[in-house]
Amino acid sequence: MLSELLLTEMVRLSQQDNMPLHRQLYEAMRRAILDGKLAAGDRLPSSRELTQDLNLSRNTVVAALNQLCVEGYLVSRVGSGTYVNDNVPKAHPRARNTNAPSQHAGLSKRGNALSTTFCATQLEVQPFTPGIADFSAFPVALWQRLQNKHWRMTYPDMLDYSYSGGHAPLRRAVADYLRVFRSVPLDVDQVIITSGTQQSLELCAQLLADHGDTVWLEDPAYWGAVKAFVATGLNLHPVAVDHHGMAPQPHDEKKPPRVIYTTPSHQYPTGAVMSLVRRQQILSIARTHKAWILEDDYDSEFRFSGPPLSSLAGLDQDERVLYMGSFSKVLYPGLKLGYLVVPKRLTAAFKQAHYDLNRPGQMPLQAALAEFIELGHFASALRRARQSYAERRRCLLEALQPCLGEHAQITGAEQGLHLCLRLPSTVDDKALAQRIGKTGLIVRALSAYCLQRQDAKGLVIGYGYAPLEEIKQHGPILAKALKAELKRSGF
Ligand SMILES: Cc1ncc(COP(=O)(O)O)c(C=O)c1O
C-alpha cells in the first residue's frame, strides 16, 4: 500500500531530522520513485485521497506534490491526475539492494538543498527556452585563429595561474567598455576576470558575508544566485519585486541585510527596470546597514527600446556596489569568462582570495578575447546580435499580441533575451508551462522562480535561442495555448 510505505518512510525521516511534514512527504515520495516502488507512468492517488490516507493537511500534501512536479519527478495531467514521470532516473541498483541510504543520503543538508531544490529542471534547449543566447553565429574560424596565435606566442607566464586578477589587456578592455557604456567609474585595477557570474557571486558571498548572515534577494529570483548563497550558508531574505524592481518594505528592514543581490537593469526574470528612486532607496538602505550590493548586469548589452540605463554602480557614492557581468550571452556560455568590479578598498583582498580559492588561469584564452575586443570583433558581434534579437523579439511580440489584454500583460521586453508574460494569480502557470512543453516548446512558469510569494504567475519566454523562422512558426502555437488557458481559467 502506498500510504503505508510513505508513512513508514516519513516516520523514519522524522526520527532522523527535524524536517517539516511537507518535506518528509516529498522525500518519502521521491525515494519511492527512485527506488522503483513507484514506477514510471504510475498514477498517484488524488491529493484529497492522500490527505485522508496520510492524515495530513491538504496544504502539506499539495506542497510536496508541487515540489515533485517542479523537479520533474511527477507530471500532472489536467483532468486526468498526477503521474510518475516517464523520464525519472532510477537509483543505482546497488544502493537499492543493500538497504543503503538512497541517492542523497551521503550528502550534507547543504548538498541536498543544492542538488534538489530550485534549479533548472529542464535543460533542453528549444524555441523559447529562456536564458539561452544564439551562439550559432559565433565566428568560430576567427576565434580559432586568435586562439592559435596566442598559443603560439605563449610563454611560461601565460601557462601559470593568474595572480593579478586576469590578463591585463582583457581587464583594460572590460574597464573601457564599462566606463563608456555602463557609466561605471573605475580603474583597471578594480576589474577581476572570473569564470562567469556564478563564480563572481560565490566569491562575493564568501568574502563579504559569514555563515548565517542575511542576503536580500529579489523574489522571484535568479536560481544561480540562490545556489551561490545556499552554498555559502547565507540566510535568504526574499524581497518582492514590483514594476520598478526590488521593492523593500519597512518590514524587510527587520532583517537587516549584509548583502543585497539585485538585477536592476532587467530584473531576472520579470524584466522590471529599477527606477531611479528605487536605486537611490537601495543605495540608502545599504549605507544605513553597511551592506554590500551585488549588481548583476547580466544582459544589459541587449537594450532595444527606451533610454540607455546607467548602472547602479555608477550612482554609488560610498563604494558599496560590486558590479558583475558575463561574456556568456554575447559570445557563448561555455567560454566561461566574466568580470567582477570591486571597490578599491577591497581589490587586494579579492585578488588574493580569488587566487587562493579558485586558482584562476586560462591566460591564452583571455588574451584571445582581449584581442577579439581590441580588433572590434566584440562590437560587431554585439551589433549583429542586437539586430537579430530585436527582430526575434518583434516577431514574438506580434505573435503574442492577440492574447494580450487586461489579464495577460508583457513586462521586461525592452531588454535582454526573454520577456515575461504576466497572468492572473489564479492561473496555474506550472501546469500551463507543462502543457506547452507537450507541444515541444519550452517556457518556464514565473512561479517556479518564486521563493516565497504566491501571487506572481506568468510565463518566462525566451527569444534568444530560436532563429526568426522558428519564432514565426512556433509563436502562433504558443499564442493558441495561452488563449486556451485564459479561456479555461475564465478570463
Ligand atoms: C540573472 C543572470 N545572471 C547571470 C547569468 C550568467 O551567468 P554566467 O556568467 O555564470 O554564465 C545568467 C545566465 O543565465 C543570468 O540569468
Image (cartoon, rainbow, N blue to C red):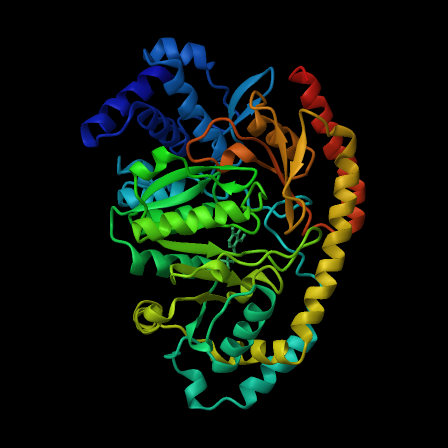
Please state if 252 lies on the left or on the right of 240 as rendered: left
Please state if 147 lies on the left or on the right of 189 as rendered: right
Q: Residue 401's spot in the image, x, y percent?
A: 77, 34
Q: Residue at x 53, y 62 (%)?
A: 326
Q: Say which of 418 and 302 sits in front.
A: 302
Image height check: is 336 above or below 457? below
Image height check: is 170 above or below 54? below
Q: Residue 20's spot in the image, x, y percent?
A: 28, 26
Please state if 149 lies on the left or on the right of 9 as rendered: right
Q: Residue at x 59, y 49 (%)?
A: 131
Q: Is residue 139 visible?
A: no
Image height check: is 167 above or below 258? below
Q: Residue 139's spot in the image, x, y percent?
A: 69, 71
Q: Say which of 120 and 265 sits in front.
A: 265
Q: Is residue 54 visible?
A: yes
Q: Residue 458's spot in the image, x, y percent?
A: 60, 31
Which quadrant of the figure contains the C terminus?
Answer: top right
- Residue 345, by quadrant, is bottom left
Which quadrant of the figure contains the N terminus?
Answer: top left
Q: Residue at x 58, y 46 (%)?
A: 273
Count of numbered marks? 0
- Residue 387, by quadrant, is bottom right
Image height check: is 300 above or below 46? below
